[in-house]
Image: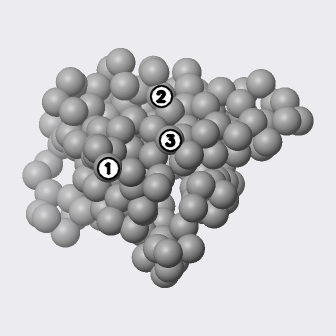
């Protein structure tokens, strides 16, 4: 049976596990990142893994969520520097597109497919998914402060729009069409026309 760890040891081990998982996801993808490979890379016994995570998907979701949060912070910093009076559907399209491009160029987040999102989310507790969606709504509410939105546009509308753009990006990435960039911008612009004054 694994021994008890003090808080410092727990934090160090958890960080090693997360780093191992991130590295393996980049190299092998979600489906081929196994608990056995993670514990080997993190140099911990398998029993220790289960002190921190109930499933592989719980760990992978946490790793992805941590990167997602870093990206959100960067996005809010960037958008806070933009003069709100200069935001219109065209400038907002370029701005939002640049955020999705950041995701697409991120070494870890770029490896995620629609199938991976489905695989991970199907194996997570419902309350974990609900918590993540609530965090996304909070991010959307922060983003709304910087956008000249039409009256009646809700946090749910903005959050759902951002999700729709993300899943469209994943789909277009899988089709590897040379018009993907143009199509994504077209979809973003259509949404911006609908929600911005």
The secondary structure type at the circle numbered 1 is loop
Give how far across and how far down residue 71 sits, in percent. 47, 61
The secondary structure type at the circle numbered 2 is helix
The residue pinned by badge 1 equals 151
Label disc, if present, on residue 117 of the rendered structure: 2
Give how far across and how far down residue 31 sits, in percent. 55, 25
Give whichever of discs 1 and 3 has the lower sequence position. 1
Q: Nearer the viewer, mark 2 or mark 1?
A: 1
Q: Residue at x 35, y 58 (%)?
A: 144
28, above or below 144, in the image: above
Give whichever of discs 2 and 3 has the lower sequence position. 2
The picture quadrant where one finds residue 126 is top left
Q: Residue at x 30, y 39 (%)?
A: 156
Give how far across and how far down residue 179 sits, in percent. 85, 35
Q: Residue at x 50, y 75 (%)?
A: 85
**Along the viewing direction, whichever of 128 and 93 lies nearer the viewer:** 93
170, above or below 16, in the image: above
């Amino acid at each position: 049976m694994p021994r008890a760890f003090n808080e410092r040891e727990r934090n160090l081990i958890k960080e090693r596990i997360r780093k191992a998982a991130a590295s393996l996801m980049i190299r092998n993808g979600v489906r081929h990142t196994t608990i056995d490979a993670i514990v080997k890379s993190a140099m911990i016994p398998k029993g220790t893994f289960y002190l921190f995570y109930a499933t592989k998907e719980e760990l992978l979701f946490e790793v992805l969520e941590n990167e997602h949060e870093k990206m959100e912070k960067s996005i809010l910093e960037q958008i806070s520097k933009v003069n709100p009076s200069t935001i219109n559907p065209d400038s907002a399209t370029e701005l939002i597109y640049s955020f999705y491009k950041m995701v697409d160029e991120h070494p870890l987040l770029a490896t995620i497919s629609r199938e991976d999102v489905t695989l991970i989310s199907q194996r997570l507790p419902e309350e974990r998914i609900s918590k993540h969606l609530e965090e996304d709504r909070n991010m959307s509410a922060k983003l709304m402060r910087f956008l000249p939105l039409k009256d009646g546009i809700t946090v749910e509308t903005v959050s759902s729009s951002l999700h729709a753009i993300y899943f469209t990006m994943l789909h277009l990435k899988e089709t590897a069409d040379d018009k993907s960039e143009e199509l994504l911008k077209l979809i973003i612009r259509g949404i911006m026309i609908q929600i911005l004054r």
